[in-house]
Image: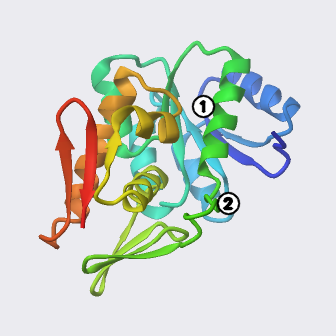
Amino acid sequence: MNNDKHNILLVEDSTDLGYLLSEYLRMKNFKISWFADGESALKNLETVKYDLAILDITMPGMDGFALAEQIKERFPELPFLFLTARSLKVDVLKGFYIGAVDYLKKPIDEEELVIRIENLLSRMVVRTTAGEKATIFKIGRYTFNVINQELMFENEAFHLTTKESELLHYLVMRKNKLCSHKDILIKLWGANDYFNKKSLNVFITRLRKYLEMDDSLSIDNIHGQGFIFRQ
């Protein structure tokens, strides 16, 4: 994979780890901007566009969760993942609930990190395969713009995270058909495992919330199998 055009934001307060990761990712031809605190990273985001943000959680001042909330609100097109020593289930689920595309636990092998980043970035490329060329969909009383990651209801706009948009696009393309847990997780998360399945359920709940103003729409849970988006 050619990484020359991929610009990554790294927010890590550990000087040693921040330096190590920055240098290794640069060696792999990524562009890296490293900040040791959330406030500096947010200020930089006002002028620089990134393809992915890697966030530590335990930092002085603004922690990673608070930073992620700010990114989601102010820069909803930017996907982010957590790289952290906090491995409790409650933290993992919170990270996915906020909108993370992945949650990685320290210590992590640098080669594994690169592979995960490459897989994430490759899945975020807008799909242009046959049957998926449309970028604007009419969903009941909503309009869904895939490119802008925006869901419109009358005059109200909802700015979706990358994962929300990817999941909604996947379901819309397969409306009224069963989408299995396994197929969704492998396609959008890269792996069919326990934590990813929990994350999927969180994102389904969020999509249902967005779509609740039109009673003709539903995302039905088929127990033990998957979901059906009905329109």
Residue at (43, 37) in percent of width and height: 183
Residue 116 lies in quadrant: top right
Q: Of callouts 2 and 1, which one flags the residue occurring earlier in the amino acid sequence?
A: 1
Does residue 24 appear left or right of residue 168 in this picture?
Answer: right
Estimate the x, y position of residue 207 in percent, counting from the top left.
28, 56
Q: Is residue 141 above or below residue 177?
A: below
Disc 1 secondary structure class: loop
> Do we see residue 111 in this rendering?
yes
Instruction: Indicate whether 42 appears above or below 139.
Output: above
Q: Amino acid at mark 2?
A: Lys
Quadrant of the drawing holding the N terminus: top right
Q: Which residue is tagged 1?
A: 12
Seen in the picture, residue 147 relative to 200 is either above or below; the reply is: below
Residue 63 visible at all? no
Report the disc number at residue 49. 2
Residue 15 placement: quadrant: top right
Residue ID at (48%, 17%): 85
